[in-house]
Amino acid sequence: MSTSLPPSVAAHLPTGLLVGGRWRPARSGATFAVEDPATATTLFEVADADERDARDALDAAVEAAEPWRRTSPRRRADLLRAVYDVLTARAEDVAALVTAEGGKPLAESRAEVAYAADYVRWYGEQAVRLDGLARRAPAGTHHQLVLRHPVGPALLVAPWNFPVAMIARKVAPALAAGCTCVVKPAQLTPLTTAYVAELIRAELEARDLPAGVLNVVPSSSARRISEPLLADPRLRKLSFTGSTQVGATLLAAAAPHVLRTSMELGGNAPFLVFADADLDAAVEGAVQAKMRNSGQTCVAANRFLVHASVAEEFTARLTAAFDALVVGHGAEPGVTVGPLIERAAVERVADVVAEAADGGATVRTGGDPLRRSGYFFAPTVLAGVAPDARVVTEETFGPVAPVVTFDDDAEALRLANGTPFGLVAYAYTRDLARAMRLVEDVEAGMIGINRGMVSDATAPFGGVKTSGLGREGGEAGIEEYLEPVYVAL
Ligand code: SIN
């Protein structure tokens, strides 16, 4: 049972499955444990859904699909506005949950709740602005009318690193578009989803809206949920955030029914620092781009590509900035860096760091797991890293900043694009022409120029190459849940 959660949260936290507007145990009666990664102790036991529960949830989503699709855009918008209000009013409770099960410092959790609420508010606003098209065909033979219909019941598979924002980024556009959904929260962080799902369920009930609009099936096996649902032709949409490897498997499973898919997959973000960069700003941006959620974001700067003439100065300043960070339990005052999510993550980060050091990199600070309970790794700066070291070529998902040097713009671009991933790139330069050349040539779905943070609920988030398909957020995010229907009149 919970030790670090406020009693007001712990007392009202559903730990079952939400199916058709009702919380209930898994059919098997099984549960699984959810840990606090900062203490490695169990917070709660949560219902462990299997294939039968997944089908029940889809049944409920299918039953609610027709009435929800016919619900007016204004009522859908009002629902989302009410959810925004209640999420904002309960922000402290939700942030406490995010910190308890995800480990991030409270200030970051509060920022995540605000980010999540922004998605809900934005898609509430978009629900009444689903414009179509009406025009005379160029040949003059008829009129073209384009309507936008909801794609239908959606399976939304969320990651553990942003347990409220990633749910909001999927559920809000789905509901705004008129789709019902089955949510599979991450096994490591299902508590925040449950708390927020209960807020939405209560709003649906209070407004006499269809109960099966939102269903939630936590499970210790993602496959037990995804396999039966992807094989069911009544499911019409899959949205997934997670690794490229799992995404590719899901895409294959989605192929037989030609399912609409949105895939937000892995990254390997370059963070470029040119000789003319404002180094104070670059270091501040580097800490932000690297250390948010202890480096466990798919937009985390994974490799620092720095012009040789400023590499030493940048590395020294980055090292000083990392040394000033305070590592600890995210709920403790003053802590700026929390734990990694699980033991395996610490082991993986330790491996790639040791391998880089063996390959000739210098550990300027950190370099090891911290000797304390929980899953902590010291903020680490590595200098003189070979461009083909695993810490550079693979997504580290940890608090490690490897610095690689370049000599000219062509080499910087070659290094930046030398990866199968293409989610985001960051660049610091005072030269606008150079920045615009990068914008043209860097292979990434998002680019931060003199900014260490691009995430914004009102902008299209997503990647190119193996980083994904489709976009979440902004005007584009709702398109993923809409089907254009062309009428020739
Ligand atoms: C992610 O890591 O998947 C999302 C991060 C963000 O939205 O900023």
Image (cartoon, rainbow, N blue to C red):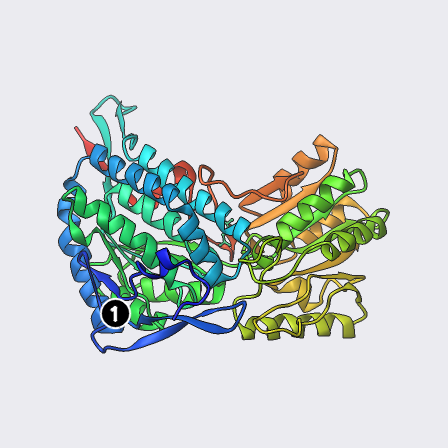
Q: Is residue 127 above or below residue 468?
A: above
Which of these two is toward me, 10 or 317? 10
Q: Position of residue 199 (x, y in %)?
A: 29, 49
Residue under the image location 40 percent in, 42 percent down:
117
Residue 163 rendering spot, x and y as whole percentages: 43, 56
Amino acid type at circle 1 is Pro
Front in this rendered view, residue 436 or 187: 187
Q: Residue furthest front?
A: 7
The quadrant where residue 183 appears: bottom left
In which quadrant of the rendered view does residue 332 lie?
A: bottom right
Which residue is under mark 1? 228
Q: How many marks?
A: 1
Residue found at x 39% / y 36%? 475
Where residue 178 appears, as percent x and y from the top left, is 23, 43
Asked whether the viewer can see residue 436, the reply is yes
- Mark 1 neighbour density, 10 Å: few (under 14) some (14–19) many (20 or more): some
User: In which quadrant will I find the N terminus?
Assistant: bottom left
Q: Residue at x 24, y 77 (%)?
A: 29
Quadrant of the drawing holding the C terminus: top left
Residue occupying the point 78% across, 53% down? 320
